[in-house]
Amino acid sequence: MPELPEVETVRRGLEALVKGKTIKQVNVRYDKMVSPNPDEFKSALKGKKILDIERRGKYLIFRFSENLSMVSHLRMEGKYAVLPHTEPLSKHDHVIFELTDGSDLRYNDTRKFGRMNLVPSGKELTVGGLATIGPEPTPETLTFEYLSQRLRSKKVGMKSFLLNQSNVAGLGNIYVDEVLWLTKVHPLQPSNTLTDEEIKALRLNIFSELERAINAHGTTVFSYLNAAGHAGSFQNQLNVYHRQGKPCPRCGTLIEKIKVAQRGTHFCPHCQKLRLPND
DNA sequence: AGGCACTCCTGAATGC
DNA sequence: TGCATTCAGGAGTGCC
């Protein structure tokens, strides 16, 4: 499932593969995937040049000529691939951007959860979750002051806090579990009970974990591949995610799996103890 | 405010 | 073997 490191890996791949190319025509095979309706989507994109591909959190932002932009979210299994136009379509190719050089940019999405929205350039931040998205998880944009204020202004469990893109952009189920394990904080620990030391550690762990994951070209679990069709390797560096019943790399206690915020949640019951308010 | 549940989807895993 | 059920989840919506 693409989170920030995977989306950034895709963005870099797309930049190398399709930046500067021109769209001949677009084929939409699953109408609900695009906005506005498929007819407007296709006619607006016809003849446009791909000027740049940017990223904000887990959202990709394509910039086209004539002040047109497209916000694309891959959700669970969305993938882009660049292939010769003569290559047969696969079952789950839902949107095909036919390019004038004879290649296709194809969007493939087994579960059909991904969405693409065309907007005038400059209006990108009005689309869906981008309207309320929190700071990018970098040292410059996610400051200690912001994070501690935000944590203390709420009392949600830490897993919910970090999954909420309006608090911090880019983290998903895998990296939230990993970052909480690194910081030795329980997924249900109320956000307003973290100490300053924990907040400092959490912040640094977010940065280092995402940086390491980007360097490994993201995590490949189940079927996720990046734009060039390659798997990432970060799954080999996961400490708790999908490791229920296996020993904690730090203390050897068996990793547990519980449900938090409708998500499978992995943690070490020894390293990540829930602290009650009057402890 | 915050915790749920539900929805969108398909394929893999599990159950009998 | 085969058919039915369960599970996985990012984000949006809606309810209590």
Image (cartoon, coloured by chain):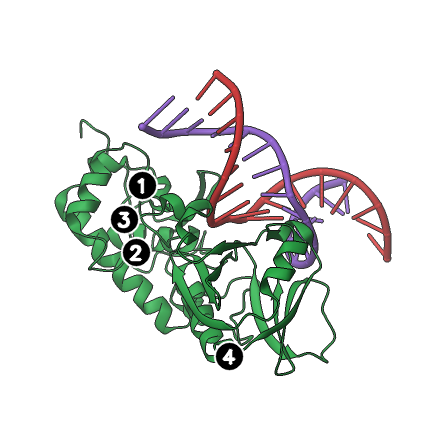
Chain colours: A green, B purple, C red
Residue at (20%, 60%) from the top-left corner?
A139
Q: Residue at label 1?
A: A158
Residue A9 found in image quarter? bottom left
Q: Do dots 3 and 2 share one subunit?
A: yes
Check disc 3 and report its element: helix, strand or loop: loop
The one of A240 and A54 positioned closer to us in this rendering: A54
Residue at (25%, 52%) from the top-left corner?
A183
Q: Do dots 1 and 4 share one subunit?
A: yes
Q: Give the crowd class for mark 3: few <14, some 14-19, many >=20 residues within 10 Å.
A: some
Q: Residue at label 2?
A: A136
Residue placed furthest toward the front: A66
Image x and y of residue A149, in percent: 18, 40
The Cα atoms of the two marked residues, 1 and 4, are separated by 38 Å
Q: Do dots 3 and 4 share one subunit?
A: yes
Image x and y of residue A148, in percent: 18, 43
Image x and y of residue A250, in percent: 28, 58
User: Chain for mark 1?
Assistant: A
The Cα atoms of the two marked residues, 4 and 2, are separated by 25 Å
Q: Nearer the viewer, mark 3 or mark 2?
A: 2
Q: Do dots 4 and 2 share one subunit?
A: yes
Q: Which mark is residue A271?
A: 3
Check disc 1 and report its element: helix, strand or loop: helix
Is residue A222 rendered to the left or right of residue A199? Answer: right
User: Contact (CB < 8 A) between labels 3 and 2?
Assistant: no
User: Chain for mark 4?
Assistant: A
Q: Residue at label 4?
A: A17
Task: Give, as a three-letter code, the residue at label 4.
Answer: Leu
- Give whichever of discs 3 and 2 has the lower sequence position: 2
Is residue A230 rendered to the left or right of residue A91? Answer: left
